[in-house]
Image: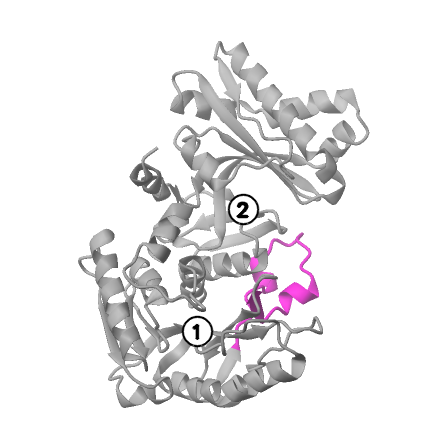
Amino acid sequence: MPLAYIVNISLAFVKMSSSAQTTQVFIPGKNWILSLAELVSFLEAKRAKFSIRSLSKEFFAVSIEEIAGVLTIADLGGILKIGNATTEFATQGIREAFLQKDNQARDELNKAIVPNNLINEMFAATPEKVFFGVSVYCAEESLRPVSKIIQRFLGSSVKRELSTHGKKSRFMGFSRDREYPQLSPVEVLKKHLVESKTEILLCIGRKQTMVANTVAVHNPFEFQKRDVGKPNQRKIFAMPPRLARIMVNLASCTQGRLLLDPFCGVGTILQEALLAELKVIGVDLNPWCIKAAEENLEWLKREYSLEKAEYTIFQGDARRLSDKLIERVDAIATEPDLGPALRQVPTTPYAKKIIAKLKPLYAGLLEAAYRVLKKDGRLVLVTPHIRTRSGGPVTMPIGEEAASIGFEIVYPFQKKIFASDVEVKKKLAETASFVDAEMRHKIGREIHVFQKIGK
């Protein structure tokens, strides 16, 4: 399949009605807490009326009453799939059917799990033989060992229902070595399952289970294009466009407003902000980065037809922003120096020396950021998260210093965004930063979100 065709599929979207409440299912990436924080920030910035009905590392179920405009999955860096919920029932029925092996429970489950509207969607979108897939996302630990059995059960149920309507169908299977029965975004894209409305999501929560049609899927080819397809890249500490988009959304900066990156590098955060229809300013001390960022943003304008994109890039010291900026900005998202490139995992004392050496830079940035931000503007800031030989990470706690300057920490998971029957663990409610690091990383990222208070 031509790459260009696959890329165009990323335009799948979800329209949010202002007149009726809809339930959307969101499948997050590996860092589910960061994905949830991004989604909440995005919806709040759009002034959406929403309530999180269910959350787990496998999926989020969100009732959305109103949102300004259209939510496209391309707007989000941390979400893999979006589904429209078609039906809902108690998870207890699945336990009885597959753990207790109750045949009557299976019959009842079959009636609940294959509603006519699910089949009608397939009929409307696929006039010929139906090719469909089923992905199971299971938040209930006791049911995970039988999730493949559940997936085959649902596939067979759909096939039988289609045959009663005289419709031939084929069910997409999996290799035996796959841990969980879930289609990847690439598989969904290549098999055209979004356009034909033929991927079914079975989202098994601890109390309630939802069945949904996939209406949008993450397009890794687009993010890859903006990563390695642009004219200039950085080999060390290169920020993935996916993470840059998450940071832009955490900044809660909406269309037409001004976002600043005072350590812009080759412009990765700036490019994601331009795609979000923001105006941007990039600053960097390195003259090569200025030239590279300008070339990258010109490339972006051509590739994505962004004729109206507004950006300014200039050389300067991030600790002296007010010397050159003639207007205050609505938001700042940035990744300063994270320390030296390490060939091996450092000792704890050496990691602490790295942090100590970087502290003056971060302190100067906090003060400069406060001066150029508008009231209530957000600062999304990355600090180093260094893995050590002792096993424990060495980090840079900057919350108290930010507070002393006039920032307040943004806690995204406040009780008001959850349905009344959702239990929110204290640890989640008190989450103030987000770590984005894998075992292969010697220096990972810790993402902080601050908001300016006062004038």
Nearer to us in this view, 273 or 173: 173
Q: Which residue is mark 2?
A: 27
- How far across and down, in percent of the image, does residue 21 sit? 48, 44
Q: Is residue 427 magenta?
A: yes
Judged by depth in the image, the label closer to the viewer, 1 or 2, is 1
Most foreground residue, 75 or 395: 395
Q: Is residue 4 above or below residue 337?
A: above
Closest to the observer, 385 or 203: 385
Percent position of residue 209, x then y: 64, 38
Residue shown at the point (40%, 59%) measured from the top left: 241
Query: Which residue is located at x 28 percent, y 69 percent?
Result: 293
Residue 256 falls left or right of residue 49: left
Residue 335: give its label. 1
Q: CA distance from mark 1 to mark 2?
A: 27 Å
Local secondary structure at mark 2: strand
Q: Amino acid at mark 1?
A: Glu
In the displayed orientation, state which residue is furthest to the left.
307
Q: Secondary structure at mark 1?
A: loop
Whether residue 183 is visible to the viewer of this picture, yes or no, is yes
Residue 147, given in percent of the width and then of the height, sits at 68, 34
Q: Earlier in the sequence, mark 1 or mark 2?
A: 2
Tell me, yes or no, whether the highlighted magenta stretch contains residue 9.
Answer: no
Magenta residues (range): 409-437
Question: Which residue is painted at 69% across and 61% down in the image?
Answer: 425
Residue 288 vs residue 80, the one in the foreground: 288
Image quarter of residue 246: bottom left
Report whether residue 112 is seen.
Answer: no
Q: How many marks?
A: 2
